[in-house]
Image (spheres, rainbow, N blue to C red):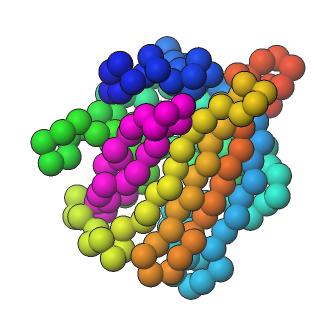
Amino acid sequence: MLGEDYDKLPAALQDLHMVAPRRNWCGEASIQRGRGVFASIAGWIGGFSPESAQTRVEIEMIRTPDGETWIRKFGSKSFRSSLSIGQYRGRAVLMEQFGLFRFAIDLSRDGDRLRFPVLAVHVLGLALPKLLRPISETSEYVDPEGRPCFDVRITLPIGGLVAHYSGWLEPETNANRSHFS
């Protein structure tokens, strides 16, 4: 989807997104949750993990005929999403399906980072108005140790912070295997 920009990404990010036919990753993350009523409701609906200074992360990525399925496990909480290439206002975008929610994401390279801003959100096929649409400040980058890292901050125009989680990943090996063995 990124075309030539994919080749300009750091090798660790390119490796993270090589899903053929299945990849498992593990690492650690910190999770911060919003405190307000709207943030709590949105966090519950979104299935975000509870707040934690440090939690184990496991990700299983599976190539499918339509794209990819990602199963993310933060501590004991897991969630699944499906990713595919779709169209939004006449251009190619990353589409991510979480349960009843479908997100149109403007995947782009920004220097050595990948950015994932949300352009639109649909629930049961109906577009959410901008006032209710989550704002995603999400990026992937490589840390000084050469590991792919993620930083995901989700806010609401009314309600503020829903969740902020950040951490690092490494390919799963026999030495660090847990859930997906």
- Range of residues picked out in magenta: 101-124
> In percent of the image, x 31 and y 55: which residue is there?
119
Q: Nearer the viewer, residue 108 or 29?
A: 108
The reply to whether residue 102 is visible in this rendering is no
Q: Quadrant of residue 40?
A: bottom right
> In percent of the image, x 51 and y 24: which residue is there?
9
Give the quarter of the figure containing the N terminus.
Answer: top left
Residue 94: % across, % down: 34, 39
74 up-or-down from 4: above or below: below
Which secondary structure dominates the residues rendered in magenta?
A: strand
Q: Nearer the viewer, residue 166 or 62?
A: 166
Q: Residue extending furthest front? A: 111
Q: Left or right: where does residue 25 sit relative to residue 56?
A: left
Q: Nearer the viewer, residue 37 or 1?
A: 1
> In percent of the image, x 76 and y 30: which residue is there?
144
The reply to whether residue 99 is visible in this rendering is yes
29 up-or-down from 61: above or below: below
Q: Residue extending furthest bottom? A: 37
